[in-house]
Amino acid sequence: MSENLNDEKNKKNKSCVNPIESCLLSLPPKQFTLLSTIFGLILLDDLSINQKNALGNFIVSVGQTMLTAAAQEQSLQSDSENDQICEDIDDLKKQITLLKKELNSRK
């Protein structure tokens, strides 16, 4: 019984520790987009044009950096998967060659 309570406390603690992952990134696309729009509108208040430009460019730069890193990770993962597929194809070709030899030897 106490283990179940500890598990639930740990789940609650995890969601409190990383609210970006547990709350923000789990939102459906429309709500996620709406939230970003609301944040953008809230940040407009009390900023000069220069501050808005600077902050906007900063946020875009952060996003671009994240997208670049994610694209590279995806590319490397894809290359690794492609290498494995090529190895599997080579193995299948070898098996086919062996089967052909075996069939020819039985004729």
Image (tube, grey):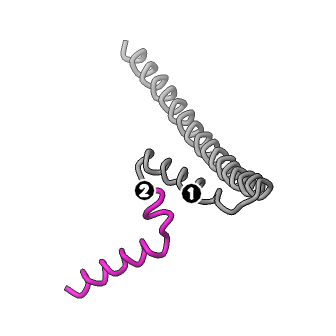
**Where is residue 29 drawn, in percent x and y?**
44, 45
Position of 26 with respect to 45 (left or right) is: left
Residue, far bottom: 2
Disc 2 marks which amino acid?
Ser
Asked if the magenta segment contains residue 23, the reply would be yes
How packed is label 2: few (under 14 Cα within 10 Å), some, or many (20 or more)? few
Residue under the point 23% across and 88% down: 2
Against 89, residue 7 (above or below) is below
Against 11, residue 40 (above or below) is above
Residue holding disc 2 = 26
Position of 88 with respect to 49 (left or right) is: left
Against 1, residue 107 (above or below) is above
Residue 39: give its label.
Answer: 1
Disc nearer the start of the sequence (1/2): 2
**Where is residue 55 drawn, in percent x and y?**
73, 57
| Image quadrant in which you'd find residue 7 | bottom left
- Where disc 1 sits, the SS reads helix
| Image quadrant in which you'd find residue 104 | top left
First to last magenta residue range: 1-26
Against 55, residue 88 (above or below) is above
**Where is residue 17 drawn, in percent x and y?**
48, 75
Name the one closer to the observer, 12 or 3.
12
